[in-house]
Each structure stands twice: as structure tokens, then as C-alpha cells.
Image (cartoon, grey):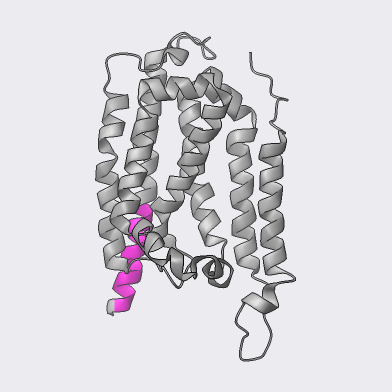
Amino acid sequence: MIDWRHWHNEPWLVGGLVVLGWLWAVLAGPLRSRLAPPRPSGTIPFPRGHAIRFYASLLIFYLAVGSPLDQIGERFLFSAHMLQHQLLIYPAALLFLLGLPAWMIDPLLRPTAWHWPLRLLFNPVVCAVLYALVIGLWHHPAAYDLALQNKVVHVAEHLSFFGVALLYWWPVASPSKLFPPLPHGAQMLYLLGVLIAMTPVFAYITFSQDILYATYEYAPRLIPDFTAGEDQLLAGVAMKLVGMTVALAAFGYAFYRWYEAKK
């Protein structure tokens, strides 16, 4: 059964998040005067809004993979595992980007040797293809069950989900002035394109007549009469509905900004 007191406190997880939080604090604190352009008044205000978003991202990341939700998703419910992935892909990744001021990220992207590789990586078509490809391949039964049985592979799965989620959001929410977000009209087309590209993965999970993942087929049932088939159906529908809701919300925001610019 579930141990609700079981929270992951492994050094690689907690230590990694602490290091990221510490690095952000150092850049925004002692090094801010060197990195951030001064205001006309000569002062360089602390980026409070960015701080809230960045640390909220780290918190959501930890809740997704460090809370008892990880145990439920790994051993019992496919739908809980899907919720983990959605937390990583949507709020955690988006808030991470929105928590980085341009003056904090651009010095890392400026070296000439990185310019063309990064220009290719941040191309919206490449971002969309990598996102759809990585998410789709991880949902292949062999890869998914391997991740559930092997802790190292499971960590790699979650990190790759978060990594491609950063790419997914980059054309919409890039914090960089060197590699800025797409114009609002192009953002709308991009979001719709990714939504369409992800449809086969949703359909594969939702409409499969078989239980795709053996781990969940033979897992103990936490909820009486809630079968593995119903769990799989819920996971597939949640994948589509949450993804569509988030994409349409971003689409609506881009449309609003595009309309305001045209007025």
C-alpha cells in the first residue's frame, strides 16, 4: 500500500534543486549588478516576479517526482503517472522559463560557437518535432515499462520530459533576447501544430483495446472496481484534455496580444 510519509529526499533530487535555487539567487543577488542593465535611475531592482515563478517551478518539480504521487504513479496508477508528466511539462517547465530574466540567460547563449547549434535547436519546427518524438517514444510499452522497473531509466524519462518541455515552451515563452519567442501570430500556428502532432499518442493510449503497460495491468487496485482499462482511458483522456486546455489558453493569450498589436 501507499506510504503517505514517503517523500524522496535523495541527494541528486534535493541537492539538484537546491543548487539550481542557489545559482539563481547568486545571479540575481551578488552578480545582478554585473549582469543586469541598469535603469535610468541607476538602480537595478531585484526581479521579484521572476523569483516567484522560478522557485514555484522548482517546488512543482519536487512535488511531481518527490512526493507520494511518484509512488502511486510508479506502482499503481497510470493516470497518476500521467499527472506527474503533466506537472513537469506544463507548469514546471513554463514557470522555469518565465523565472529567468533575459540578462540571466543570454550570457550563456551568447558564445559564437553555440550560435548556429542553438539557432537550430530553438527553431520552432525542431522544438515541435523533438517534443512530439520524445513524448511518443517514451510511451512505447517497452520503454514505459522499463522506466517503471528501473530507477535510473525512470529518472532519465522524467528529465527528458522536462527538457523537451522547455523546448516546447521556448517559441512561446523564451526569456532570451538573442533567441526570442515567435511573433504572436506564429505562436498560434505553432501551438495548434504541436497539438495536432500529439494526437496520435493520445489516440494510441485512449483507444487501445489492450492494456499497454504490464505494470499497471497487474498492479494492486487502489480504487475498488477501477480497472486497469479504465485507468488507461482516464490517463489518455487527461493527456489530451489537459494538453488541449493549456495549448488553447496559450493560444488565446497569443491571440489577445496579436489583436492588441493590430489595433
Q: Is residue 65 left or right of residue 167?
A: right
For the point 64% across and 70% down, which residue is it?
A: 47
Q: Position of residue 3 (x, y in %)?
A: 69, 19
> Where is the C terminus found, in terms of image quarters?
bottom left
Q: Position of residue 83 (x, y in %)?
A: 49, 33
* Viewer can see residue 226: no
Name the main secondary structure of what is drawn in magenta. Answer: helix
170 or 219: which is nearer to us?
A: 170
> Where is the N terminus found, in terms of image quarters?
top right
For the point 45% across and 20% down, which residue is it?
A: 145
Is 16 above or below relative to 255?
above
Residue lying at the far front of the rendered structure: 113
- Dividing the picture into quadrants, the one containing residue 33 is bottom right
Q: Position of residue 95 (x, y in %)?
A: 53, 55
* Viewer can see residue 152: yes
Magenta region: 248-261
Is 218 above or below relative to 27?
above
